[in-house]
Image (spheres, grey):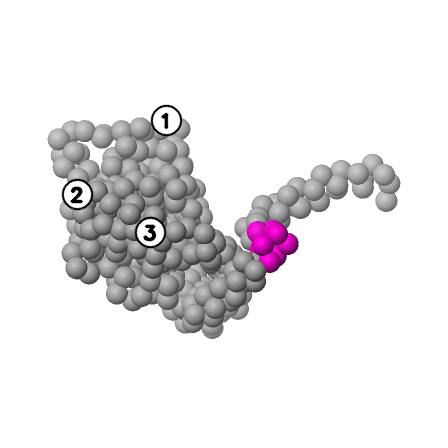
Amino acid sequence: MSILTTEPAAPGRMDRGLTMARRHAIWLVTLALLGALMVFVPEQGAASLRFVIDAVAGTILFLLASVLLAAYAGATGADNLIARAFTGAPALMVLSAALVGALSPFCSCGVIPLVAALLAMGVPLSAVMAFWLASPLMDPSMFAITSGIMGVEFAVAKTVAAIGIGLLGGYGVLLLERRGWLSDALRDGIGNGGCGGAKVRAPKPVVWAFWQDDARRAKFLREATATTLILGKWLVFAFVLESLMVAYVPGEAIARSVGGEGLGTIALAALVGVPAYLNGYAALPLVAGLTEQGMSAGAGMALLLAGGVSSLPAAIAVWALARPPVFALYLGFALLGSMLAGLAWQGWMG
């Protein structure tokens, strides 16, 4: 083989290397952080490592359940059920979209093409907003992990809150639509729909007994592996951060800032959650640690909810697709709903 044919292959290998590095960046950061602790603060490094091992051991069954749920949904095609939420009268669509957004797993193509398809096909913004607000907050995998870290009662309450925030935004937008506002939600040039839109245009039947098909069995294994890697890297990273937080962040300071039971601390937690949120799975151990150090129950709920809706991928999706007034409504309903849910949870825990 000549030099001319071999030289162009190098950039391809380099690109693949960069892609792999980005894909595993969280693992590299976690290892680097633990390595630095072992070198410069060996006692804390050993303590953090023990903390991570104990935390993973305590959540392993819930992690396994979340992996199996996600893989089963992908292999059976259960994510196609989402298309059925966007039929019927607008008020009914808002209800079903909020329920589907909070409860059903769906394809990893991402929220951008799916929501673009829904809006481009003429689905009312009210129903799309309900789905948009609820979908980042809860799904079966998130429920399993939340149950393992925060408890089943908290996971159920967060699910109810996700549906409630979706309904708040959906019916709020529906009122504005009926007044003639928000008639043009999408930015110019948006509306192709992509791979996510295919699930809405032509939903395929669900094959619950996926193990009878070779291709679906292979997809189950791929989904299980991918989900394990995604959940694993974020949870381990979060547990390392939690160990440092427990060691170095004074519990008294947390209690003074967000340890009260009034609206002020819950509102503060929601406002902090918007810019500071990291990842739905990574945030759970961090909030659990903050709660143990004095954060109020309502503030913890508000932080998780506000951050979940406004997490970077979700916020970018909204900004890329929607006009600024829709983006403002998205964040406004997220903040209001998170505060109300935080107050409700605080009252329930009373």
Q: Nearer the viewer, residue 117 or 236?
A: 236
Distance between mark 3 and mark 1 Cα atoms: 50 Å
Frontmost of labels 3 and 2 is 3
Q: Which residues are magenta?
A: 31-42
**Looking at the image, residue 92 lies above or below residue 190:** below
Position of the C terminus, as image quadrant, is: bottom left
Residue on which disc 3 sits: 252
Viewed as shown, does residue 342 lie left or right of 49? left
* Disc 2 crowd, CA 10 A, few/some/many (<14, 14-19, 20+): many
Q: Nearer the viewer, residue 328 or 83?
A: 328
- Residue 318, quarter of picture: top left
**Looking at the image, residue 223 lies above or below residue 129:** below
Q: Residue furthest right?
A: 2
Residue 186 in sight here: no
Residue on which disc 1 sits: 188
Residue 295 in sight here: yes
Frontmost of labels 3 and 1 is 3
| Tag shown at residue 221 | none
Residue 81 sits inside the magenta stretch: no
Residue on which disc 2 sits: 171
**Looking at the image, residue 342 lies above or below residue 63:** above
- The type of residue carrying mark 2 is Tyr
The kind of secondary structure element at disc 3 is helix
The answer to whether marks 2 and 1 mark residues whose Cβ atoms lie closer than 8 Å is no
Question: Which residue corresponds to the image point at 22% horizontal and 30% vertical from the top-left?
Answer: 182
Q: Can you give x and y, in whole percent of width and height, for residue 124 in the image?
A: 23, 39
